[in-house]
Amino acid sequence: MDGSLALYRHSLALLTDLYQLTMSYGYWKLGRADELAAFHLFFRRPPFGGGFTIACGLGPFVEYLRAVHFEAEDLAYLATIRGTDGQPLFEAAFLDHLGRLEWTVDIDAVPEGTAVFPHEPLVRVTGPILQCQLLETPLLNCVNFQTLIATKAARICQAAEGESVLEFGLRRAQGIDGGVSASRAAYVGGCAGTSNLLAGKLFGIPVVGTHAHSWVMLFDDDLEAFDAYARCMPNNCIFLVDTYDSLAGVRHAVAVGRRLRERGHELLGIRLDSGDLTYLSREARRMLDEAGFPNARIVGGNELDEHLIESIKHQGGQIAVWAVGTRLVTGGEDAALTGVYKLTAIRNGDTWQPRIKLSEHAVKSTTPGILQVRRFTHEGQFVADMLWDQTLGLPAESEIVDPLDPTRRRPIPPDAGHADLLVPIFRGGKLVYEVPPLGAVRARTQAQVAALHPAIRRLTNPHEYPAGLAPNLHELKTQLIVAARARRS
């Protein structure tokens, strides 16, 4: 399995918000806990002002759901919570119900590493409403953050144009789980390795690293420091050259590199972590080449993100490996994905009844139904996504309707191929999906991004990918909105 929960040694059943339990208690108290409902997880805008988002976090959620149950300690804690009258908030019989709970939900999801777009469901959960409600917070917790970081990593790797990107963010990450989850998601997004040893152990991600400034500062100068490191670890020599004077550090790295070569080893490269990376990398490249080290790589660091990497490359920088930390593992300018989890249908006898949430802001109105996403492809490229309702079926019209502007409609090419994105993960609470190795998920990300039009992939002012509603789903949504507003008047 994924390995995420090996980080913890106790129950995660209370990794949720109190209101999930209060609502679940209400369903139980009213005798409605087993009524069938459908919820969908989706987001409203792509992060970073980008044209695409990379789905991530399903693997850890699968492991969570396979393992989670309410233990005696969890129930004992819930029994201590009091209402404003000083009485227990939850009846003992309800807590007993939680203790006996066995998951029976059906879950369908977009595989990790898939390019996704606003308003499309990443996950669909159907089953008893109490169970669906209990899964809201942990599902969002797993998917929102890792989707954010995988997307950031994909953008950074795109800016690097095929050069290696390393995730070096553990020291700046948001706590232990933030660091481990970020390393996993960064690898899914395309990073080649991480400095995080725990993530390497849990997920099989390649680990990288040599020494920091403290090693150099232990000695009188960096020449002595590099020489000492080379004697200790001759098969791992990338020297951090900017402790005192970057270009002098490059000369000292070259001198030690020659001694390494005499002993049958090779200088792997140098690392620049401050200063004008464009100028310094160009000078360092010239110095290394003239000294006979054309294969020594230049590693660049220092508060990098996709925009700075793109700028350095356009200015002729000679960095071959990008060590990215803070702005990757924290999401940089975007603190969170706008992921939400909304009720879209309830079961009444043999039929599903759609449900809709309205808002003064059109973007916050939800799409009703039992939803699926059909992706259309043409000549190896993604051309459009159609959000459709499985209870209505596929429409006769081969077009999509913009969910925020129904006057905007786009025809689907008649010869386009297609595939539905949501696939079965759990049926009746049992896992029916084979979680792929993380390397395969990483490869999927790369293939998905490559299948997007370059105008959608670009980092600044990307084109909007055509993703909309099936015409019959648009009509259903419109009817529900009109009916809901009539009831309010």
Image (tube, rainbow, N blue to C red):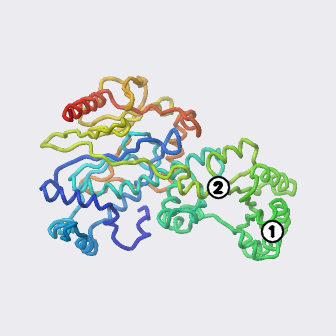
Report crowding for label 2: few under 14, some 14 to 19, many 20 or more residues within 10 A (C-alpha).
some
* 1 or 2: tag closer to the N-terminus: 1
Q: Which residue is denoted by mark 2 in the rendering?
A: 303
The image quadrant where one finds the N terminus is: bottom left
The image quadrant where one finds the C terminus is: top left
Q: Amino acid at mark 1?
A: Leu
For the residue labelled by badge 2, is the local secondary structure a helix, a strand or a loop? loop
Q: Is 443 situated left or right of 312 in this image? A: left
Spot occupied by residue 133 in the image (x, y as percentages of width and height): 26, 54
Rendered position, 108 above or below 221: above
- Disc on res. 411: none
Q: Residue at x 69, y 44 (%)?
A: 311
Q: Amino acid at mark 2?
A: Glu
Q: Residue at x 57, y 54 (%)?
A: 328
**Where, by quadrant of the figure, is residue 43 drawn?**
top left
Report crowding for label 1: few under 14, some 14 to 19, many 20 or more residues within 10 A (C-alpha).
some
Query: CB of mark 1 within 8 Å of CB of mark 2?
Result: no
Q: Can residue 400 be seen by looking at this rendering?
A: no
Spot occupied by residue 157 in the image (x, y as percentages of width and height): 60, 48
Q: Which residue is denoted by mark 1 in the rendering?
A: 260
